[in-house]
Amino acid sequence: MKVVAFKRELQGSGASRRLRNSGQTPGIIYGGTEAPVTISLDHNALYHALKKEAFHSSILDLEIDGKTQQVLLRDFQVHAYKQLVLHADFQRVDASKKVHMKVALHFANADVSPAVKLHGATISHVANEIEVSCLPKDLPEFITVDLSNIDVGHSLHINELVLPAGVTAVTHGANLTIATASVPAGHVAAEAAATAEAPAAEAKPAAKAKK
């Protein structure tokens, strides 16, 4: 994805306010061997880009004065109640060094899992993203979580995920829970009542036929 930015000379809260009033968003690029560079970006283009999931977990081609460098979006601030992006931080990427990024999880095949198909269970997504480590070229836009084998009372953990080649999960020693399957309380109560009624119906003597 491509991002066009412009070098920003003036700094300070006053300069940033004037920049925002003119339809621009202040930002900064840092990292690598070069010094940090303050930049400005078109607000509307940035605002719409931030709505795209891939913008948050992809290597971006950021162009300044006709020169392009690869960066990651590291942080951004938005106004508390206005549709206004206040600031954006980008980090330079070294193609030979691994990056740590949070990547979104896409859940698939819940409808064919034993939990849902056989028991009418609800599958809860405990995590919607995980942190990964990989070279920039291997960074995935998202990771697919296959729920086709999950059953009632079971959970899917991070070590069970199938990750793309070259990508490892950063777990800090914890086997994090990604999803769980459970039957809703009302459904359990209804099943229990039906089970209790069945033996009672079988034990009831048949009515004698009238002569």
Image (spheres, rainbow, N blue to C red):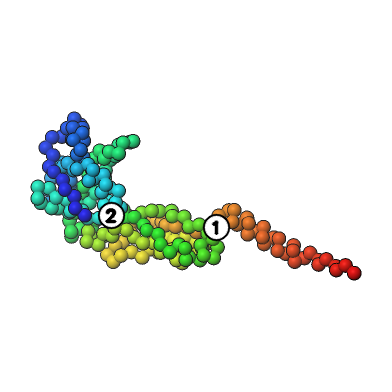
Among numbered discs 2 and 1, the one appearing first in the sequence = 2
The answer to whether 42 is drawn above or below residue 126 in the figure is: above
Could you tell me residue 50's position as x and y percent? 27, 47
Q: Nearer the viewer, residue 112 or 8?
A: 112
Q: Quadrant of residue 171?
A: bottom left
Residue occupying image coordinates x 40% and y 53%: 127
Q: Taking the image as drawn, is residue 187 in sight?
A: yes
Q: Nearer the viewer, residue 210 or 94?
A: 210
Q: Residue at x 30, y 65 (%)?
A: 164
Residue 209, image x and y in percent?
85, 68
10 Å neighbourhood of mark 2: few (<14), some, or many (≥20)? some
Rendered location of residue 146, percent (x, y) = 40, 64
Q: Tell which tag, 2 or 1, sits nearer the viewer.
A: 2
* Residue most extreme to the top: 14
Q: Is residue 25 above or below residue 188?
A: above
Quadrant for the C terminus in the image:
bottom right
Which residue type carries mark 2? Ala
Q: Amino acid at mark 1?
A: Val
> Mark 2 falls on what kind of element?
helix
* Label number found at residue 183: 1
Give the x, y percent position of residue 189.
62, 55
